[in-house]
Amino acid sequence: MHPADHALIVIDVQNDFCPGGALAVAGGDAIIARINALMTKFPVRVLTQDWHPADHSSFAANHPGAAPFSMIQMPYGPQVLWPAHCVQGTAGAAFHGALATDPADLVIRKGFRSAIDSYSAFFENDHQTPTGLEGYLRTRGVTALTLVGLATDFCVAYSAIDAARLGFRVTVLEGACRAIDLNGSLAEARGKMRAAGVVLDA
Ligand code: VGL
Ligand code: ZN
């Protein structure tokens, strides 16, 4: 068991990010058995859930003429336009059936505001609007985080970098993550995580 100040943060292990889902990440379901085993070893366990309204501005379908995986400029910066995914209340937004959700202390949802995406578990994509997770972890005395889940180069990386900036000690277990890897996004995300002081482990 890890010490009491160490939390496992499981990012977005949802049907839409697994094979057969709307924004499937290759091998997304292959990490679940390891994540379930990890959950028994951490005293604090948090699951995040990408949770979008159907009119979410990150969906290509909500921008007439725009192709999925193209980029647009939003008031808060550049934004990838995704296939519609993790729509609130749909099967795609549910956790993968093999994920052990009962051990979770907290499930935190993000991306529920139409006008702004939220990759990170800590801040929306304006890098300012908090999700509340920082307060939860601090009030539970957490100082160190291990991150796993989907996708390495988007929600895991954004969460890890924000956490490091907030002063948490952060490790990403890359073997318990899978990436989208859009136009070199995985290499870029790994570089940014390392630069932020995130430890990349197997
Ligand atoms: C994610 C793209 C859009 C993720 C969420 O979980 O990495 N990626 N929404
Ligand atoms: Zn999303």
Image (spheres, grey):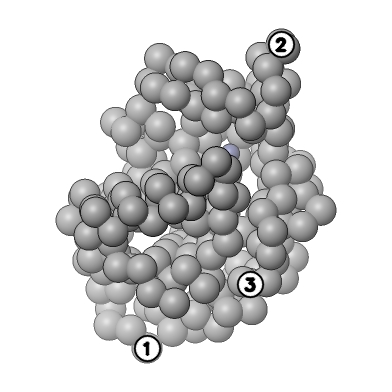
Q: Residue at x 46, y 36 (%)?
A: 118
Label 1 Cα neighbours within 10 Å, binned few <14 / some 14-19 / many ≥20: few
In whole angstroms, how far apart are the C-alphas of marks 3 and 1?
19 Å
Which residue has dot 2 on it? 64
Closer to the N terminus: mark 2 or mark 3? 3
Query: Which quadrant of the structure image shows residue 28?
Result: bottom right
**Left or right position of 75 against 12:** left
Return the residue found at the far left. Answer: 167
Q: Is mark 3 within 8 Å of ligand 1?
A: no
Q: Are marks 2 and 3 in contact (CB under 8 Å)?
A: no
Residue assigned mark 1: 1
Residue 103 visible: no
> Percent position (x, y) of residue 46?
45, 62
**Disc 1: residue Cβ within 8 A of ligand 1's nearest atom:** no
Secondary structure found at label 3: helix
Give the residue displayed 52% in from the left and 35% down from the top: 111
Residue farthest along the bottom direction in this orientation:
1
Q: Is residue 193 above or below residue 112?
A: below
Given the image, on which type of amino acid does mark 1 rest? Met
Residue drawn where x is 56% and y is 56% of the image: 179
Q: Quadrant of the C terminus?
A: bottom left
Q: Are marks 3 and 1 in contact (CB under 8 Å)?
A: no
* Residue corresponding to mark 3: 32
